[in-house]
Amino acid sequence: MRCDEIAVVLPEMVDRTGPIDASVAGHVETCLRCQAELARYKRLLRGLQLLRTQFLEPAPGLLASTLVAVTEASERRAIRSVLSGRRAAYAGAIAAATVAGVATGAVVLTHRARRRSAALVH
């Protein structure tokens, strides 16, 4: 077997979650590279187990500074949201004013045209 094939089953050897093939065990016993990798997995597992039992005291003021940072970030996001909403409102107002102006112009021109044609008929 090759080392890259063995590397896939090394975590199972550390966890002992499944049966270990005799050829895998034989390879690990004779291969220094795979033995070193197995030792790294074991150290990693021990370190993770230690983290379960250790309690780290947070630094004084950590909660307050975290809350301030979250509040500032949410305020910035709210301001950006309001500004983009205002831009959309401004664009809508400009579009509505333009449509109203064009409609008013059309009514005025139609009214003038009717008056002219009525004046020509009389």
Image (spheres, rainbow, N blue to C red):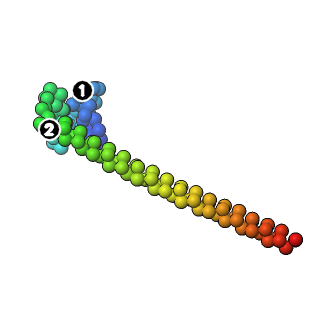
| Up/down of 3 relative to 106, above or below | above
Q: Estimate the x, y position of residue 101 in percent, counting from the top left.
A: 62, 63
- Which quarter shows the N terminus? top left
Q: Quadrant of residue 74?
A: top left
**Can residue 29 be spotted in the picture?**
no
In the drawing, does residue 58 fall left or right of residue 122?
left
Q: Which residue is mark 2?
A: 61
Instruction: For label 2, count other residues whose C-alpha is less than 10 Å away and answer few (under 14), some (14-19) or many (20+).
Output: few
Give the SS element for disc 2: loop
Question: Of residues 28 and 50, which is closer to you in this image?
Answer: 50
Q: Tag 1: residue type?
A: Arg
How many marks do you count on the picture? 2
Q: What residue occupies the far right of the structure in this picture?
A: 122
In the drawing, does residue 3 fall left or right of residue 104?
left
Q: Tag 2: residue type?
A: Gly
Q: In percent of the image, x 85 and y 73: which residue is there? A: 120
Give the SS element for disc 1: loop
Q: In percent of the image, x 66 and y 62: which residue is there? A: 104
In the drawing, does residue 120 fall left or right of residue 73?
right
Which mark is first along the chain, 2 or 1? Answer: 1
Question: Of residues 98 and 33, which is closer to you in this image?
Answer: 98
Q: In percent of the image, x 28 and y 35: which residue is there? A: 9
In the drawing, does residue 94 fall left or right of residue 56?
right
Q: Of the residues tagged 1 and 2, which is closer to the observer? A: 2
Q: Estimate the x, y position of residue 81 in percent, counting from the top left.
A: 40, 49
Q: Quadrant of residue 20?
A: top left
Q: Quadrant of residue 25?
A: top left
Q: In percent of the image, x 74 and y 68: which residue is there? A: 112
- Which quarter shows the C terminus? bottom right
Q: Which residue is mark 1?
A: 16
